[in-house]
Amino acid sequence: MTHPAPALAGLTIDRVETFAVALPTLRSFGVSGGSVTVAGRPSIRILVKVSADGVAGWGEATPIPAWTYETAESIVSTIDRYLAPAVLGRPCWDLDGVTTAFDRAINRGFSIGAPLAKSAVDVALHDLLGRALGVPVGVLWGQRRQETIALGWIVSGQTADEVADCVAEGLDLGYRAFKVKVGLHSEAEDTAVVRAVREAAPDAPLWVDANQGYTADTALRMARRMADLGVSAFEQPLPANDVAGLRRLREASPVPVALDESLRHPSDLATFVKLGAVDVAIAKVQRSGGLTLSRRLCALAEDSGVRLMGSGLTDSDLGLAASLHLFAAFGIDTPVDLNGRQFVRSSYATGATVEVAKGTARVPTGPGLGVDVDETVVRELAVEVFDR
């Protein structure tokens, strides 16, 4: 955006606030690294409010230590002490400049640094820009290829005997695609769970996600079993930095290999493309540090002929809306894993929010993200993650 609209030209970031909120948990959820949500225990989300001359936007970070290294405490301290001071006084429209400032404040290691914290601020800036202009994020980009996104129902942690009830619940709610978390049990047990899902939903699109839980030998054996069950994609079977192993697996696997944790930054995808080590790239807003870098990653995948799929981090409605705008912009027309509504309640969204019905989410059409945040409720839900 080299020539900002007059309504944006004078807007500079004057305040960045963080709120750790405790949201109601609807059911338990786990991945190969451990628990993500626990029924009966609140789910902590970090909400970020960015203000510029009386206009405000909101973003969200989802701390999941079982999935990545960022915690609620680290996200709050990173934003409050490093990212916010780096961007105060900057033009709110200068998203590229903000990304550069982020990298100077918290630099990259092997890959992107503190992506969840950076994402929350970046998404809030997109929300602010859309609200300042009175347009949704897709209009801000000039890129919106579809109005609805199909969602997948998540099966995680169940035994084979318990799966039928989980699938039946999803079918009753109108979901017609299923994603199964594997790597939680033995090979035989994981296979039995996937087989039980396939038997309960014979014609449904079905993909599996190991969240880095397998070795190369185990992953290849599982891929062959998954092919027999009609699985369409095998998501992140190996550790994120096992580039050589993922390349060998991609060459031998009868099921397309999809990369999630491996693709923190667009440059990571470029490496996998050059090495011929990726079939499918997973678009995930928080993992890639926000919408700015996610758009670059998606554009690279599209230009490189790599298929795109979509995923989230049990986001509440702010994160859900951000992902929907991204996926709609790039026309992701296969079911996506945006499972926040399955596991948490977004109590702060008391006005306009995301419409989900019969397993389909409608891309918001309101200004910015299209989610109205009740700040009074946010402050009521706020908890201290440490003594500041």
Image (spheres, rainbow, N blue to C red):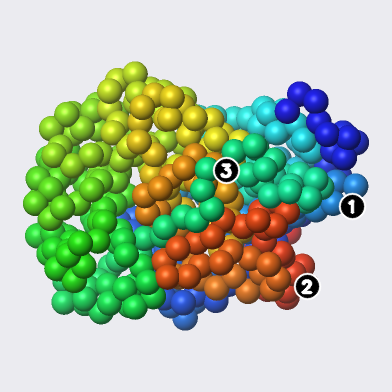
Mark 2, Cα crowd under 10 Å, few <14 / some 14-19 / many 20+, is few
* Sequence-first disc among 2 and 1: 1
Mark 1, Cα crowd under 10 Å, few <14 / some 14-19 / many 20+, is few
Check disc 1 and give the amino acid type.
Gly
The answer for how far apart the CA atoms under marks 2 and 1 are is 17 Å
Q: Is residue 113 above or below residue 364?
A: above
Q: Answer left or right for 69 relative to 176.
A: right
Camera-side mark, 3 or 1: 3
Residue 147 in view? yes
Mark 3, Cα crowd under 10 Å, few <14 / some 14-19 / many 20+, is some
Check disc 2 and give the amino acid type.
Thr
Check disc 3 and give the amino acid type.
Arg
Secondary structure beneath dot 3 equals: loop
* Quadrant of image for the N terminus: top right
Q: Which residue lies under the disc numbered 1?
A: 54
Q: Which mark is residue 144?
A: 3
Residue 124 in view? no
Q: Which residue lies under the disc numbered 2?
A: 376
Q: Is residue 33 above or below residue 306?
A: below
Q: Nearer the viewer, residue 358 or 301?
A: 358
